[in-house]
Image (tube, helix red, strand yellow):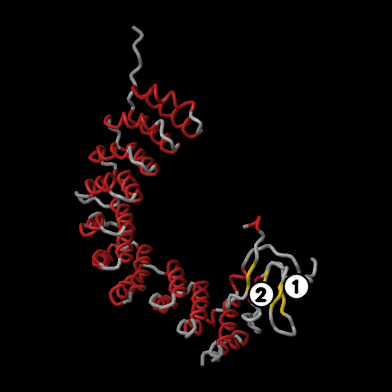
Amino acid sequence: MYTADMDPEVAQWVEMLRSPQLDERLVAVKTLQHLGNEDAIEPLIGALYDENPTVQEIAITTLWEFATPVAINPLIECLSSPHENVRSEALSALKELVSTNDLMKLLDLLQVGNTHAQLNVLVLLRKIHDAQALPYIMPFFESENPDLREAAVITLRYLNQVVRCEPALALAKDPVESVRRATALTLGHLSDAEVVPLLCELLTSDEDWQVRRNAAQSLDILADSAAVEALVKAMDDPEWQVRKFTARALQKTPDIQALPVLIKSLADEYSDVRRDAATALGKLADPKALPPLQQTLNDPDMDVRIFSQRAIDAIQKSQPEPSNV
Amino acid sequence: MALTTQRVDVPVIVDESKCLEKCVACIEVCPLDVLVKNPDTGKAYMKYDECWFCLPCEKECPTGAITVQIPFLLR
């Protein structure tokens, strides 16, 4: 069949790839992978439809190594495979191979494929970044499957030029923690009017600490002064990661309201919190912070000492020179 | 390199029930060339007791017949 014009060394293995014996097909596909001869591309695409998932998986790896665009469509079909290993290998291969030209094929599969295919396509759309995918992603925000809701809201974060997406906001109240965690991070990339109040609510009242931490990270990106009150409250959060990212967010929006909590955080149990609180106090540039900052120059953590000194320098630099008269 | 005397003591263990006679994937990828085929059985084995624990043999084996036992201090 396809062996006529082939390198004879390749041809014997291609022939063996059609053997009814699984052992022989495994040896053949593995050897073709090692030979790396492009004559084998077409037979290897045929091997993607082999009944054995291990043969399929090795064929996918080999086609991935060839990086040939001819294999993209057959590899996209593998995203719907019932075998986890096959899907996972095809996804890894396609992450490197897909381009904007394949967008329509992926969007078609997103509409008609099974759940596995939909999850994988949502991941691949993050590589293409095209805002055209938005209308196709939005129905998944209301999916009954939490994995699909989570994947969809993560993908939204990667789409270029998308700054508003009201349907995604509802996922901030999702009953599943992983969905809320992903949503809290995605909201940092949106600019709907409700985003900042919603993030403030997540930061101060969500029961999951990772949601609160992600909300603080998003507020750090948005740098909106409307969030200061919630940030001040979150500096008393029981989880240190939340306090750390809250202190970082307060660096972007210096406000005198935060002075007492930031001074208190200079004595936090965790050095990352002390360091970021010191930096935030430096940005605040209030001389009242100088005495507590000077005390942290003896902190056991070197990072804290360095950043406290920088904060002190910044505050002193921002003060007007005393008059000599 | 020292020849192995006890095949059970070497770090690369081949499950002969899974090893395919015509397959040479592990032998080709071994950077130290310490794996060979037993001419009697057609199964791979570790001929020389020398191993970098680099693991391509384990990864490349299409049937999962190879296990590399990594010493405790290298784990």
Chain to which the residue tagged by mark 1 belongs: B
Q: Quadrant of residue A49?
A: bottom left
List the residue tagged with mark 2: B14
Q: How many marks?
A: 2
Q: What residue is drawn where x is 66% and y is 55%?
A: B73
Spatial CA distance of label 1 from label 2 is 12 Å
10 Å crowding of disc 2: few (<14), some (14-19), many (20+) = many
Chain to which the residue tagged by mark 2 belongs: B
Label 1 amino acid?
Lys
> Nearer the N terminus, badge 1 or badge 2?
2
Front in this rendered view, residue A220 or A72: A220
In the figure, is residue A216 to the left or right of B46?
left
A203 in relation to B10, above or below: above
Q: What residue is drawn where x is 51% and y is 73%?
A: A61
In the figure, is residue A194 to the left or right of A250?
left
Front in this rendered view, residue B69 or A304: B69
Residue B49: % across, % down? 75, 67
Label 2 amino acid?
Val
Q: What residue is drawn where x is 38% and y is 40%?
A: A244
List the residue tagged with mark 1: B47
Front in this rendered view, residue B44 or A60: B44
Residue A51: % across, % down? 47, 85
